[in-house]
Image: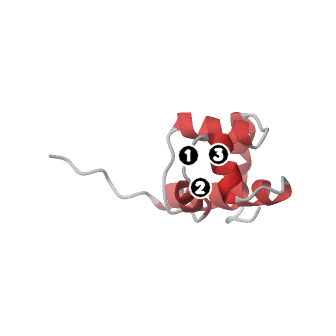
Amino acid sequence: MNRPAPPSSDTSAFLHALGKRVRLLRLTAELTQDQLAAKAGMSRSFVSLIEHGAHGIDVVRLARLAAALDLPLSTLIRQAELAAQAGGLG
């Protein structure tokens, strides 16, 4: 059975930048992790893993997270991409 390949440095940088962006947006919206998780239909522990860049996220969950943050999915992805390219700032 094949095991998934470990994330590349590009993927790791993106996940880290995405997590930082989600956390910033959550704090700006004055939401706790519990509140964001409830709005997005996921557990608080999963939101925490995402915010720490420690877990990948499928597109369906990412879309639910973006909607919970009142943001188009494309904008959330683009912001994370730009932050990753800038070295994780943002």
Q: How would you rate the neighbour count of disc 2 (Cα within 10 Å): few for under 14, some for 14-19, many for 20 or more?
A: many
The amino acid pointed to by label 1 is Met
Above or below: residue 41 compared with residue 21: above
Tell which tag, 3 or 2, sits nearer the viewer: 3
Viewer-nearest of discs 1 and 2: 1
Label disc, if present, on residue 80 of the rendered structure? none
Mark pair 3, 1: CA separation: 6 Å
The x and y percentages for residue 47 are 59, 55
Q: Earlier in the sequence, mark 3 or mark 2?
A: 3
Return the x and y of residue 12 as percentages of the image width and height.
51, 60
Residue 75 position, x and y percent, is 75, 39
Tell me if 79 is positioned left or right of 42 in this view: right
Amino acid found under the numbered disc labelled 2: Val
Report the side of 41 relative to 70 (left or right).
left
In x, y percent, where is residue 67?
A: 71, 36
- Give the residue at mark 1: 42
Q: Nearer the viewer, residue 27 or 54?
A: 27
Q: Are marks 3 and 1 in contact (CB under 8 Å)?
A: no
Q: Quadrant of residue 65?
A: top right
What residue is disc 3 on?
38
In the rendered image, which quarter is residue 50 located in? bottom right
Question: Residue pushed farthest left?
Answer: 1
Res 85 seen here: no
Q: Residue 16's quadrant in the figure?
A: bottom right
| Lower position in the chain sequence, tag 1 or tag 2 | 1
Alpha carbon of mark 1 to alpha carbon of mark 2: how far? 7 Å
Residue at 67% over, 66% down: 87
Question: Is label 1 in a helix, a strand or a loop?
Answer: loop
